[in-house]
Amino acid sequence: MPQVTFKVWRGNKDAGEFKDYQTDITEGMVVLDAVHQIQAESAPDLACRWNCKAGKCGSCSAEVNGNPRLMCMTRMEDLPTDQPVTIEPMQAFPLIRDLVCDVSWNYEVKKKIKPFKPRKPDNEDGTWNMVQEDVDRVQEFRKCIECFLCQDVCHVLRDHHKHEEFIGPRFFIHNAQLEMHPLDTEDRLGDLKDDNGLGYCNITKCCTKVCPEHITITDNAIIPLKERVVDEYYDPIKKLFKMFKPKKPDAAAGK
Amino acid sequence: MSQTPLSLPQQRKMGQTSRKDAWWLQPLVVFLGLSAFIIYANWAAFQASNYEHGAYLSPMYSPLLFEAPTQAAIKAETLGADAHMSHHSWFGAWPSALQPSWVPGWMLSPALIILIFPAGFRLTCYYYRGAYYKAFWADPINCAVGEPRNSFRGENFWPLLIQNIHRYFFYAAAVYIFILAYDAWVALWHAPAGTNLSYNEAAATGQLEFGLGVGTLVLTLNVILLGGYTFGCHCARHFAGGKHDHLSKVPTGKKAYECVSCLNRNHMKWAWTSLIWVGFTDFYIRMCAMGIWSDWRLF
Ligand code: SF4
Ligand code: SF4
Ligand code: FES
Ligand code: FES
């Protein structure tokens, strides 16, 4: 393959611009290889975060030609190389330098989600009995590598900066994983409705489209959670029934 | 969520993006497709006539609670004073108490009474919501493309909080599927060929004969597509098992959940094919009724 021009974002949180770099592309290269080659050849101070180069650590998230992608999983042969390839940092988080963002907001969000609270063990030796089909659903969510590309593309964060009121698709996945777990007894629906801003999601499915783990975020996690919130807080007939049927104090047997 | 305000990159302007693909194409297609349907459906609903042809009843007018006065007038003109009441009408003629003289005839359309449910169902459907927020409100116009407005309330506040009513429209839509299935069954019974009997006369005297016309196939496919769309609804999925943490103990059985999930995976495709086909079904029957083309009887 020929020499390709890359427009790479250079700068910090206060200022920055796209800078052009040329480098040779050979067969099998991914965007992260090209970035490393640019570092080696012409920009040793270009900041970029990476670790596994196998799509499993979620470190190399960036935007390639405007699409949130893992740089290590984006093959050069899949991009049009007759025009410059743009590489820029994620837009939903504060920039540290060049392609590196400060994603620590996500860690703070996660700390606030009520943790797993299993029911009492089923057996004397402290173990539980589970059926595979009860955990099939949550296993999809466990594939998440926390690359935060879904957070980056979600317009509620990216364009509307609702970081104070909205936890983003990654953490709806996390909530769904806990809420649908057959052993869990915690109730997170009130938090989802009030503090976590589930209602801000307007089902654009952008998060689902960018997830490198192909998690069906919107259909399998967010909408099912929205339906559970409707059950609990918005369905007038359900509400009526609940008035006559007081909640049991301990949902120890699971839901 | 964070303690200190985040210093985030500047918000992008409307349409600003580094995307190089034709990102505007998808919202444009959705905009044109939905607009075309809305225009046709409104036109068809306000016709208040030509909604039935023999055994066929347009799905946009089903259930036909009352015969539209406009349709009754056309019949009286073409068939004479003793023209039979539509066999499809549930409660006969349009009640005169509901026919104030100042209301124009096209307003007295039976479609307007019943379309509220399918229209509400589609309007509050999770798939369509995502699609029309993009295509009609540019919020966002497409993924990773700048938006026209900075403020955003999502579905977190009124008026869009009303979208949570979707399950009630689902209940109504599910009933409609059975009504439309009945219409497809009715479409199998025609006026006997080779006689002068009109459909309504044959129906009134129990002389209908079994037969299959192109219209029967059109109506059958219509109910299949609408069924696939309706029973693949996210609310159906929730009721069939989504709300339970122990899928293995779901009363309807795990099969029901899997079945709904299977339809749900292609919800968008069901949504579009059923939308287009319901429009076409009305159009097909309308053209038959207007005499523009005639239905072809296979047997
Ligand atoms: S579907 Fe919801 S969470 Fe996902 S990107 Fe769109 S608005 Fe954000
Ligand atoms: S859900 Fe997908 S896109 Fe979001 S953080 Fe996890 S792996 Fe990344
Ligand atoms: S370097 Fe680990 S995901 Fe790309
Ligand atoms: S989600 Fe589309 S019809 Fe219910």
Image (cartoon, rainbow, N blue to C red):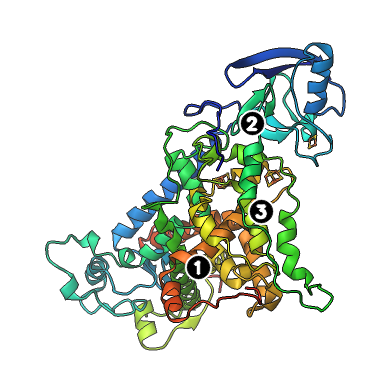
Q: Nearer the viewer, residue B90 or A4?
A: A4
In space, the residues marked 3 and 1 are separated at their CA atoms by 20 Å
In the picture, measured across the screen, residue A65 lies left or right of residue B298, that is: right
Q: Earlier in the sequence, mark 3 or mark 1?
A: 3
Res B295 seen here:
no
* Quarter of the image that includes the N terminus of chain A: top right
Residue at 25 percent across and 66 percent down: it is: B74
Question: Label 2: chain?
Answer: A
Q: Are marks 2 and 1 in contact (CB under 8 Å)?
A: no
Give the answer, above or below, for where A44 lies relative to A99. above
Asked whether mark 3 and ligand 2 are closer than 8 Å, the reply comes as: no
Asked which secondary structure carries label 2, the reply is loop
Residue at 64% of width from left, 31% of height from top? A90
Determine the residue located farthest toward the left in the rendered image: B101
B119 or B211, which lies in front? B119
Quadrant of the snapshot with the C terminus of chain A: bottom right
Considering depth in this image, is B214 or B271 the residue closer to the camera? B271
Name, please, the residue furthest toward the top: A42
Identify the residue position indicated by label 2 in the image. A90
Q: Quadrant of residue A62?
A: top right
Q: Are marks 2 and 1 on the same chain?
A: yes
Give percent across and percent down for residue A251.
61, 75
